Image (cartoon, helix red, strand yellow):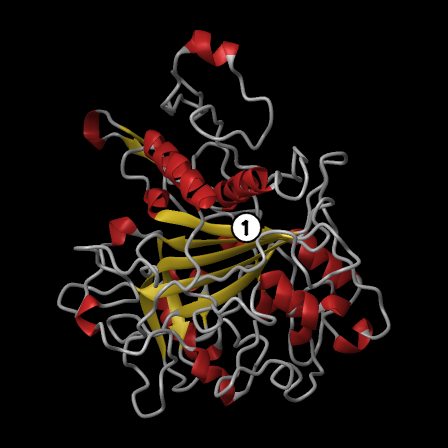
């Protein structure tokens, strides 16, 4: 039985799938969304769903499509980087390692493809002028420039968002209540990355100027299996500061996908270099089958326990402490105690289908290399909507939340949830909140729309 994928690096670093050849020929993959063990890792995002079996029957293929997108977008980019948003086809997700004399040969796990997408803050500028070309690197804020010059490895990106909502509540203090604090008292940092298709659409239509959006029908390009043209992809990420030895809860960086980055605290104006570990990832794709977009969300597998099942024995969580069992759960930080760790629990358990898929793909990552860092991540779920006449109602699942990106909006009610919220409040901009970043801006535009009692919480 073909249960393992062995990657061999030839002189051209080409990759081949090795297993039981006769059985592989008897049972070849027939569609792109074909689960392990009969699985070919690909750096190309899926164009669309390749099987359509009805509302209930779609979900297994949707979940596989989500994993396909995760693999493609977390594929390493070339180094040195000349064209952003493209994979290094001589590498593999997680980076390969080939034992040999002199320590063997290895390729890095990153930066990943999505990390080279355009940052939302480099598209929506004040005043609203045409942004730099897609392949131009991220801008460095003045407060970080001397540190960037001294630390070129970290200078490739600067994180400035303490909340997922900072980009749509820019300049408002209310967003502070949405912060997430880890067990070491460190804020989680967020960023939004947009692919070339998104960038080209916004620039060609001059939608980076809010006045150019007025009265326009906004419809981002969708990918399809017929044309094989790339579609619009958006990525939202959550990062925690890696706790070094001596902190309350030291982190093992080999268990996280990590990056060196500059972090600019918008409150203090202080810029620092940090090693960050990925803890949450939204992948949003526009396809022909999914006019309400496909919303796939992933997390580090050790983020938080399920509220219903409770914490697992001897498990160390990124955002939960068993020693604080009586602490308020899923409660934002207060002004009196701004850096007290957030006690996070998952309100809606991961369903059995997603859990089964996770086990398959996590095992498949190990076959590429036993220490593959991506085995430590899991699909929470993938939400989709196929009916344009009801833009705020997803087909399946009815609700979706990530413990690091919607920590305080996990209750399955109202407009909580990806499609539920974006469809309700951003239908005119094709479910895209990033367009609200365009200047000139209306003061408190989104803050007035999104209100949770005692908390300003746009999705």
Give x and y (percent) for residue 420.
63, 65
Left or right relative to 457: residue 269: left
| Residue 329 appears left or right of 230 | left
Check disc 1 and report the residue beneath it: 382
Quadrant containing the N terminus is: top left
Identify the residue at horizontal 62%, vertical 42% (top origin).
56
Report crowding for label 1: few under 14, some 14 to 19, many 20 or more residues within 10 A (C-alpha): many
Between 237 and 260, which is closer to the camera in this rendering?
A: 237
Query: Residue drawn at (37%, 36%), measured in percent from left and top?
Result: 365
Quadrant of the drawing holding the C terminus: bottom right
Q: Seen from this angle, which residue lies furthest top?
A: 22
Whole-percent x, y for residue 404 in the image = 42, 65
Q: Closer to the camera, 77 or 334?
A: 334
Q: Can residue 278 be seen in this view?
A: yes
Can I make out residue 76 in this image? no
Quarter assignment of residue 374: top left
The residue sitting at 50% across, 42% down in the picture is 67
Specify whether 270 is left or right of 235: left
Find residue 108 and report its horizontal and vertical position in percent. 36, 42
Relative depth, front residue between 73 and 445: 445
Local SS, label 1: strand
Name the image quarter holding residue 10: top left
Outermost residue to the right = 215
Counting from the top left corner in percent of width and height, residue 48 is at: 66, 40
């Amino acid at each position: 039985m073909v249960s393992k994928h062995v990657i061999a690096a030839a002189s051209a670093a080409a990759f081949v799938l090795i297993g039981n050849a006769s059985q592989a020929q008897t049972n070849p993959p027939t569609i792109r969304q074909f689960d392990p063990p009969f699985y070919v890792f690909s750096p190309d995002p899926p164009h669309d769903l390749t099987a359509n079996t009805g509302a209930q029957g779609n979900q297994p293929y949707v979940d596989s499509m989500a994993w396909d997108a995760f693999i493609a977008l977390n594929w390493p980019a070339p180094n040195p980087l000349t064209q952003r948003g493209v994979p290094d086809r001589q590498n593999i997700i997680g980076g390969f390692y080939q034992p040999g004399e002199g320590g063997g040969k290895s390729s890095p796990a990153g930066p990943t493809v999505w990390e080279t997408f355009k940052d939302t803050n480099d598209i929506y500028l004040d005043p609203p002028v045409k942004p730099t070309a897609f392949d131009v690197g991220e801008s460095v804020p003045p407060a970080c420039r001397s540190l960037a010059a001294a630390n070129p490895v970290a200078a490739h990106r600067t994180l400035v968002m303490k909340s997922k909502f900072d980009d749509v509540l820019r300049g408002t203090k209310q967003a502070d209540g949405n912060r997430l604090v880890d067990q070491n008292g460190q804020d989680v940092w967020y960023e939004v990355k947009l692919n070339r298709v998104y960038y080209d659409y916004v620039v060609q239509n001059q939608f980076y100027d809010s006045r150019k959006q007025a009265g326009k029908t906004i419809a981002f390009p969708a990918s399809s299996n017929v044309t094989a043209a790339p579609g619009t992809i958006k990525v939202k990420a959550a990062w925690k500061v890696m706790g070094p030895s001596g902190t309350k809860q030291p982190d093992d960086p080999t268990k996280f996908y990590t990056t060196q980055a500059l972090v600019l605290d918008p409150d203090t104006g202080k810029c620092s270099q940090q090693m960050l570990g990925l803890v949450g990832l939204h992948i949003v794709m526009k396809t022909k089958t999914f006019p309400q977009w496909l919303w796939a969300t992933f997390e580090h597998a050790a983020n938080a326990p399920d509220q219903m099942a409770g914490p697992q024995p001897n498990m160390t969580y990124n955002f939960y402490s068993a020693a604080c069992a009586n602490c308020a759960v899923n409660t934002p930080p207060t002004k009196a105690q701004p850096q007290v760790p957030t006690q996070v629990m998952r309100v809606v358990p991961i369903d059995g289908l997603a859990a089964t898929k996770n086990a398959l793909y996590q095992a498949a990552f190990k076959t590429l290399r036993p220490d593959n860092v991506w085995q430590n991540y899991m699909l929470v779920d993938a939400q989709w909507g196929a009916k344009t006449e009801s833009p705020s109602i997803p087909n399946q699942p009815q609700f979706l939340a990530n413990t690091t990106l919607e920590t305080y909006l996990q209750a399955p009610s109202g407009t909580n949830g990806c499609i539920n919220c974006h469809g309700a409040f951003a239908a005119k901009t094709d479910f895209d909140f990033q367009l609200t970043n365009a200047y000139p801006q209306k003061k408190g535009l989104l803050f007035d729309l999104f209100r949770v009692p005692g908390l300003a919480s746009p999705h």
